[in-house]
Every structure is written in structure tokens, then in C-alpha cells.
Image: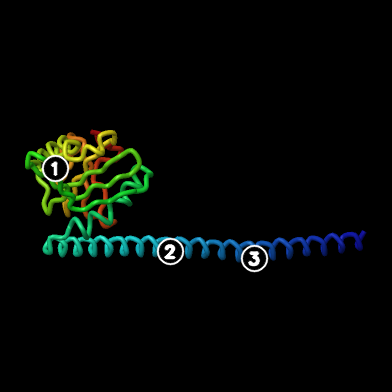
């Protein structure tokens, strides 16, 4: 009996030592995991802050570039033209087949019309008017320009025409006014030029 008791006692001590050791190792593992999670959260926070800082710097650079382009009178060439193929790709999943800048046409009766940018992609023709400052009156004028487009460019008679207005900055009220007319509106943002329309807005096809 004493032998059995000794064995049981040794077994109990061994079990206590085992539980103690397991507890220590578990605490080490738990603390290590907690440190890892904390470090991971800290890393994610740092990355988010870095991305936001980088985004802000990119936006500021685009604004400065836009201001310079406005002073030089080259907003269309420097900001809009490089952006339109990307925007068409993102919005319509189409590649631009033809891109024309400052396209001017004269009819036999002597009347003329000039469009800042004309981009052909798939069955669409995207027609752009760019202003250093965009006003509601410009939207009204552009409606007439779009309505007369096929008169000056009959070769696009079968294409769907989409109007795009662009400027450095566009007042929210003007954006809404342009939306009612069915026009896409572009202005400087995180990208060189980005769409300012309400999310889900579908441009009118003329």
C-alpha cells in the first residue's frame, strides 16, 4: 500500500509539473500571439497612414499641375487628353481607337465648330469640352454643341455620342446641373482627372 501511495504521489506531482509547464508555455504562446497581433495592427495603421499621406501628396501634385496647366492654357492637352482613354476603359471597358484634339470642322455654308477632344471607342464617340472654370451656362452651350455634332461629323452618324465636360474644379451644383443634361463631368482628384458624377450615374447617349 505505501508503495502504491508513493507512486500516486509521484504521479500527482508529475501531473502538477506538467500542468504548470503547459500553463507557462501557453502563456508564452498567448503573449507572443498578442504581441504579434498588436504589431500587425500597428503595421496596418502605419500602412494606412502612409497610403493616406501618399494620396494627399498625389492630390496636391495634381492640383499644382492643374494650376500650371491653366496658366499655360494647356489643361486639355496636359490633363484631359491623357485621362480620357483611362476613364473610357474604367467606365465602359473599351479601348480608345482614335483620339483627336482641338478637332475643327467647317461646313460648306461657312459655319465652323471646334471640339476640344473627340475619342472613338467601340460603338461610342466621346466628345469633350474643357473649361478652366465650368459654369451652368457652359452646360447649356454644350447641349447645343452635342446636338450639332453629327451635322459637322456625319461619319459618326451611327455611333452613340457621350458628352464629357472637364475642368480643374467643378462646383457640386454645376455637377448636378450637368448630370440633368446627361453629361459626364471630370475634374482634378486623386487621379489626374477623375469622374465627379454621382455614384451610379449613367451618361446620356445622344
Residue at image mark 3: 24
Badge 3 marks a residue whose secondary structure is helix
Q: Nearer the viewer, mark 3 or mark 1?
A: 1
Badge 2 marks a residue whose secondary structure is helix
Q: Are marks 3 and 2 in contact (CB under 8 Å)?
A: no
Residue 50 drawn above or below residue 148: below
Q: CA distance from mark 3 to mark 2?
A: 27 Å
Query: Which residue lies at the image location 12% right of the left edge and 54% below the top edge?
Result: 132
The answer to which of marks 2 and 1 sits earlier in the sequence is 2
Q: Is residue 131 left or right of residue 48?
A: left
Residue at image mark 2: 42
Is 107 in front, or is 74?
A: 107
Provide residue 71's location: percent of width, then percent of height: 11, 63
Is 17 in front, or is 70?
A: 70
Q: Are marks 3 and 1 in contact (CB under 8 Å)?
A: no
* Corner quadrant of residue 66: bottom left
Quarter of the figure that contains the C terminus = top left
Residue 166 drawn above or below residue 161: below
Query: Which residue lies at the image location 50% right of the left edge and 61% below the top edge?
Result: 37
Residue at image mark 1: 174
Q: CA distance from mark 3 to mark 1?
A: 67 Å
Q: Nearer the viewer, mark 2 or mark 1?
A: 1
* Corner quadrant of residue 1: bottom right
Amino acid at each position: 500500500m505505501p508503495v502504491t501511495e508513493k507512486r500516486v504521489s509521484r504521479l500527482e506531482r508529475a501531473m502538477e509539473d506538467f500542468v504548470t509547464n503547459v500553463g507557462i508555455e501557453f502563456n508564452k504562446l498567448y503573449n507572443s500571439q498578442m504581441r504579434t497581433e498588436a504589431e500587425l495592427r500597428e503595421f496596418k495603421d502605419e500602412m494606412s497612414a502612409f497610403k493616406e499621406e501618399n494620396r494627399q501628396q498625389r492630390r496636391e501634385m495634381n492640383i499644382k499641375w492643374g494650376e500650371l496647366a491653366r496658366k499655360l492654357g494647356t489643361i486639355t492637352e496636359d490633363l484631359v487628353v491623357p485621362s480620357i482613354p483611362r476613364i473610357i476603359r474604367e467606365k465602359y471597358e473599351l479601348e480608345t481607337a482614335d483620339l483627336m484634339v482641338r478637332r475643327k470642322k467647317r461646313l460648306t455654308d461657312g459655319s465652323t465648330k471646334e471640339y476640344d477632344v473627340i475619342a472613338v471607342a467601340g460603338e461610342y464617340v466621346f466628345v469633350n469640352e474643357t473649361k478652366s472654370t465650368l459654369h451652368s451656362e457652359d452646360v447649356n452651350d454644350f447641349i447645343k454643341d452635342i446636338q450639332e455634332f453629327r451635322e459637322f461629323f456625319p461619319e459618326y452618324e451611327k455611333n452613340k455620342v457621350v458628352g464629357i465636360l472637364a475642368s480643374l474644379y467643378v462646383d457640386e451644383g454645376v455637377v448636378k446641373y450637368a448630370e440633368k443634361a446627361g453629361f459626364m463631368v471630370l475634374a482634378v482628384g486623386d487621379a489626374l482627372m477623375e469622374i465627379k458624377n454621382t455614384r451610379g450615374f449613367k451618361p446620356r447617349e445622344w
